Amino acid sequence: MKKLMIVAALLGAAGAAYADEIADLKAEADALKKKNELVNKRLSDIEKRQKVLDAHAADLSVAPVKAPVAAAPVDDSISWHGVTLYGAVDAGVGYQAHGTPYNGFFPQGDNYIVAKASNRALFLAAPNGLTTSFIGLKGTTEILPGINGIFRLETGFNPFSGNLANGPGSLVLNNGVPLAAQSSNGDSSRAGQAINGQSYVGFSSPVLGTVTIGRQNGILYEDLLAYDALNGSYGFSILSSGTYNGGGDTENARFDQSIKYTWINGPFHASALYQVGNYGNSGNSSWEHDAVQANAGISYAGLGIDGVYSKVRGAVALATLGTTPAFLGSQTLAGTVSDNTAFAVNGKYKTGPVELFLGYEHIDYANPQNPVSAGFTDLGYIISAVSNTAFPNDKILQVGWGGAKWQATDHLVVMGAYYHVDQNSYGNGAGAKFSKGVYSGVGPAGCSSNAFSQCSGSLDAGSIVFDYVFTKHFDVYTGVLYSKVNGGMASGYLNSWNVAPTAGARYFF
């Protein structure tokens, strides 16, 4: 009995221990179940977030990777100790329906725009069609914190002849030559000087502006070229003519003995120029001349607008003499003297690959307040025949133009423009008529024929150019310029129109 009681006690203790173990296992199972539920919930949340991320990634046009850093542009300028050598060479060939033969002294080589002597169809060497060939030096050095000393020297040349550009020299070659036998010629501020472009020194500050002294581009010249789709190119734009970019006379595209100030502040800019000029010194007889020019404008978000004013006293337009001078090599020419006032209002707008241009210029010629005697010297040439009374009434030219420039591809640029000029009738005489329809004297007031140069008239011109740019240093181009004169602006012309297709290549350094 006692043994049975001991066995029962042992079995009871074992059962109790087993029951406790069962309870512990059950508790552990419940804990594991809760932990598994938490793990499953986290896995479900992660799966939901991944689906959202996958859907967002599918909407992206490109994989969200870090863009590579663009390589810095290579500076391949020819520079040493702050001084840079630069320039351009432009040479080509062309055809003219009514042209004049090539002249190696003439800055553009050919009269691309119809001229008085334009008389026959010609295939021609065509230099400087899109850019004047030139070579230059420029430099800058810091002289004070925020202020640099600067200089610039430039000279233009004819790449076919190697001659320095010399407009008056091209006129001298045609002294006494009948109109139908003349070569291309015309006046110019480039007169064969060693430095026939710019030659100045000065100071420059990003805050205070730039002051330069020497021989400098006129403000009107720079403005008209900046607002011309063809950038005043000889072969394709009438704004290459100093009649327009010189405010009436080509010699005033550049000013000797000038002081120029330029200021830029954000989108605003302004400039002013004063030519000290001459005041009847012994080297220039009684010739008195000086000039004032100024402009103001804004450039913002692709839009540019500028207004320019120009006043030149004693402006000179050179021309050939009707007879060969008695002493050859005398470098003598005829000259018309006037006081010229001009203003221009121009605009341009760039959107995407297209840039649009629009401009207007008004030029007023008056007889000089200070008449000049024959024998004075202009640009190194003796003016042996002088006219101080060419404008019985003020001559007015009104010039309007519009154009566009289209970056068609990474390499191809297409440019085109149309130009129109109106001239008033500024004569006050009856004129005189000789036999065979040849007129002389001053045109009558209000006339509009081509019988007299004082009659009202017009000039129309249009051009288109295709320029293929291989690199920033080399490009090739082809294009055509059409020009036609009417009324008084056609007086004395052998032909009234010309078509001048030209093709060429340029190298910049």
Image (cartoon, rainbow, N blue to C red):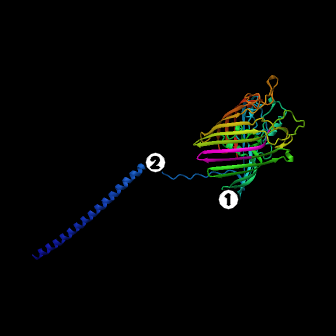
Q: Residue at x 41, y 50 (%)?
A: 54
Task: Check disc 2: other Cα within 10 Å, few if <14, some if 14-19, many if 20+.
Answer: few
Q: Amino acid at mark 2?
A: Leu
- Find out whether residue 308 is within the magenta segment: yes
Q: Amino acid at mark 1?
A: Gly
The residue furthest bottom is 2
Q: Position of residue 244 (x, y in %)?
A: 72, 39
Q: Nearer the viewer, residue 503 or 347?
A: 347
Secondary structure, mark 1, is: loop
Q: Nearer the viewer, residue 481 or 78?
A: 481
Q: Position of residue 437 (x, y in %)?
A: 79, 24
Frontmost of labels 1 and 2 is 1
Q: Position of residue 61 (x, y in %)?
A: 47, 46
- Find out whether residue 249 is within the magenta segment: no
The residue furthest left is 1
The quarter of the displayed image where residue 187 is located: top right
Q: Nearer the viewer, residue 145 or 12?
A: 145
Residue 122 seen in the figure:
no
The residue furthest top is 436
The magenta-colored residue range is 292-317
Assign the magenta stretch its main secondary structure. strand
Q: Position of residue 102 (x, y in %)?
A: 77, 34
Marks 1 and 2, Cα distance to the nearest angstrom?
47 Å
Residue 390 seen in the figure:
yes
Say which residue label 1 marks: 146
Against 53, is 476 above or below? above
Q: Nearer the viewer, residue 334 or 356?
A: 334
Q: Residue 412 got which mark?
A: none
Task: Check disc 1: other Cα within 10 Å, few if <14, some if 14-19, many if 20+.
Answer: few
Say which residue label 2 marks: 60
